[in-house]
Image (cartoon, rainbow, N blue to C red):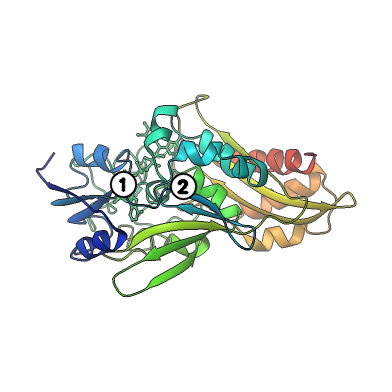
Amino acid sequence: MQTFQLRRANTPEAAIRSGAAAKTAQQGADIRFLAGGTTLLDLMKLNVETPKQVIDISRLPLDKIETASDGGLRIGATVRNADLAHDERVQRDYPVLSQALLAGASAQLRNMATTGGNLLQRTRCVYFRDTDMACNKRTPGSGCAAIGGFNRNLAILGTSNQCIATNPSDMNVALMALDATVHIKGTKSERAVPIADFFLLPGTTPDQETVMQPGDLITYVTLPAPAKGTRSLYLKLRDRASYEFALASAAVVMTMNRGKIDKVSFAMGGVGVRPWRDRSVEAKLAGQSPDKDTFRTAAEAFLKDAKPQSGNAFKVELAKRCLVHTLDAASKLA
Ligand SMILES: Cc1cc2nc3c(=O)[nH]c(=O)nc-3n(C[C@H](O)[C@H](O)[C@H](O)COP(=O)(O)OP(=O)(O)OC[C@H]3O[C@@H](n4cnc5c(N)ncnc54)[C@H](O)[C@@H]3O)c2cc1C
Ligand code: SF4
C-alpha cells in the first residue's frame, strides 16, 4: 500500500472542494472519498487504487432515510446497507431492495458499507485486482487477461473487446428495477441522474465506469412512490448460499390487474457489465397472463444478445431460468 494523506470533511461542500482537485473521478484517481471503506481500502492494499489523498466522508450529515413529499423515499449516501435493508418503509414498500441488500456480502460488511459506496463498488474480476496481470480497466491499453482467461463470473451482456467485467452489486440491480435517481453534487451544480444513465458501457474506455466527475459527491438516492398493489422480489443465484457474488440475479417489480400483468420492470445482475434492463421486453409483458411460457419468451428476448465467453456459457440458460422463476414467483405474491 502506498502512503496517503487522510483528511476528514465536515460538510459536503468541503468534501466537494477537496475532491475537485482530483485529475479524474475514475480509475487512477489521486483523490478518493472514503465512506465505509470496504471496497476502497481492499483495493488500496492491493495497489489497484493509489490515491495520494483520502477524504473521509463517513460523518457527513447524509445518513438519513426520509419519506419524500411525493410518497417516495430519499436515502442519504452514507446510510449503511444494514440500516437501509432493515428500514420498515423499505421492507414494506420496496422489499426487492431490502432482499437485494441482505443477499450481499456479510452482516459485518453491511454494517460498514454505504449507499454511495455500494453504487460505486468495483468489479470482482480477478485480473483487475492483480497488478501483475493485463487489465484495460486498471491500466488502459494493457489488454484484457479475462478474455480467453478465467471468466466464469464475468459478463455476457454489454461487453466489448476491451472489457467483459460485471458490475458486482446486488443493491444496484434492485435500484435499476425501481427506477432510482442518483443525486450528485459537484463544484458547479447539483444534478439528478436516472440510474439507467449512471453506469457507462465499457466500449473502448472501460476505466470510465460512471458519469462521476472530479469532486462529485453522491448526496442521496431517491425512489419513486410505489404504485398501489406493487409486489417485488429479488433472487440471487451463486456458488454458495452466503458471502458470494451473483452468477445471475433478478429484481422484479410488478403490478397485476384482474389476473393479468399490469406493469412490470426488472433488471438482472451477474450477467451484464452494468445492472441490465431492457424496457422493450418489459413492455411486451403488459396485459399478458402470468404463465411460465410467457415468462420464458420474455427471458429468451432479454438474453438474445448474450455473448458468452470461454468459461461462462452456462450463464445464458442460468439467467433465463433465474428470470422466469423470479417473474413467476413475483406474480404469485399476495
Ligand atoms: C468480502 C466481500 C464480499 C462482498 N460481497 C458482496 C455481495 O455479495 N454483493 C454486493 O453487492 N456487494 C458485496 N460486497 C461489496 C460491498 O457491498 C461494497 O464494498 C460496499 O457496498 C462499498 O461501500 P463502502 O461504503 O464501503 O464504499 P467505499 O469503499 O468507502 O467506497 C467505494 C468507492 O465509492 C466512492 N464513494 C463512496 N461514497 C461516495 C459518495 N457519497 N460520493 C462519491 N463517491 C463515493 C469511494 O471514493 C470509492 O471509490 C462485498 C465486499 C467484500 C469485501
Ligand atoms: S474483464 Fe475488464 S476488469 Fe477484467 S481483466 Fe478484462 S479489462 Fe480488466
Give residue 155's mark: 2
- The quarter of the displayed image where residue 209 is located: bottom left
Question: On the rendered structure, is 238 left or right of 322?
Answer: left
User: In the image, which disc is placed on residue 168?
Assistant: none
Q: Residue at x 75, y 41 (%)?
A: 328
Note whether 26 is above or below 147 in the view shown. Answer: below
Residue 59: assigned label: 1
Q: Report the side of 4 relative to 143 (left or right).
A: left
Residue sitting at 21 percent across and 47 percent down? 49
Query: Which quarter holds ligand 1?
Result: top left
For the point 44% across and 55% down, which residue is it? 159
Mark 2, mark 1: which one is toward the viewer? 1
Return the x and y of residue 117 as percentages of the image width and height: 37, 47
Decide if residue 314 is in sight here. Answer: no
Q: Residue furthest bottom?
A: 188
| Quadrant position of the N terminus in the picture | top left
* Foreground pick, 324 / 57: 57
Q: CA distance from mark 2 to mark 1?
A: 35 Å
Point out residue 95 in the picture as x, y percentages from the top left corner: 63, 41
Contact (Cβ within 8 Å) of mark 2 with mark 1: no
Label 2 beta carbon less than 8 Å to ligand 2: yes
Figure label count: 2
180 and 135: which is toward the camera: 180
Please identify the quarter of the rendering in which residue 293 is found: top right
